[in-house]
Amino acid sequence: MDTYLETSRLILRRFTADDADLLIELDSDPAVMRYLTGGEPTPPETIRRQYLPNILANYEKWGGDFGLMAAHEKDGGAFIGWFILRPKADGPLDEVELGYRLRQAAWGKGYATEGSRALLRKAFTELGVRMVWAETMFVNAGSRNIMEKLGMKHVDTYFPDLAPIKDSEHGEVRYEITAEQWASCQPAQ
């Protein structure tokens, strides 16, 4: 396994060309896709022909430092979803997006917070990142709560021109944290 990052309960690794079925299963759950597509699954061929090749190409583009990482439980190795740490396609490498998509079976166990904390630490202490941002629907209280636990601050509510899904009329929110803000929240060593 090409380990990218370990936490006390998780292993994050780079995806491989053999991982399409993991992504297809994750994106086929209407509850997982609720705040992304209104519950519509991602077509399997889109994952095989577009998403997975793009994931793999981005590892090359960013030298393996950034991208979408498969998340597995250390105890038993179950695939629980993915985390992402990446710059915008043509954006600066010191401003990166943090995100996650987890299977329902992994919800409520603190995995999103644990994995995200570890990614923030890596971003700010190893990768030279200046600022990390995350976005979600305004009504996604679970993800907003995680962002706030991480020390991220709500900086914007906006209304993108996207196909409407349930509750999208409330908009999207953006949270950010800078390296300095993150450092000031860390316990003294």
Image (cartoon, grey):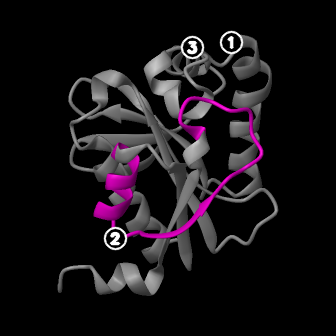
Q: Are marks 3 and 2 in contact (CB under 8 Å)?
A: no
- Residue at x 35% of width, y 50% of height: 115
Q: Secondary structure at mark 2?
A: loop
The answer to which quarter of the image holds residue 163 is: top right
Q: Which mark is residue 44?
A: 1
- Sequence-wise first label, 3 or 2: 3
Q: Which residue occupies the foreground of this view, 158 or 41?
A: 158
Q: Which mark is residue 109?
A: none
Q: How many marks?
A: 3
| Place of residue 133 in the rendered image (x, y in percent of width and height, measured from the top left) | 54, 64
Q: Is residue 139 left or right of residue 173?
A: left
Q: Secondary structure at mark 1?
A: helix
Q: Can you identify the residue that label 3 sits on? A: 21
The range drawn in magenta is 142-168
Q: Is residue 18 left or right of residue 162?
A: left
Q: Amino acid at mark 3?
A: Asp
| Place of residue 139 in the rendered image (x, y in percent of width and height, measured from the top left) | 45, 44
Tag 2: Cα neighbours inside 10 Å, few (<14), some, or many (≥20)? Answer: some
Instruction: Examine the rendered structure and indicate whether residue 5 appears above or below residue 168.
Output: below
> Which of the two discs, 2 and 1, sits closer to the camera?
2
The answer to which quarter of the image holds residue 56 is: top right
- Residue at x 28% of width, y 62% of height: 149
Q: Can you identify the residue that label 2 sits on? A: 151
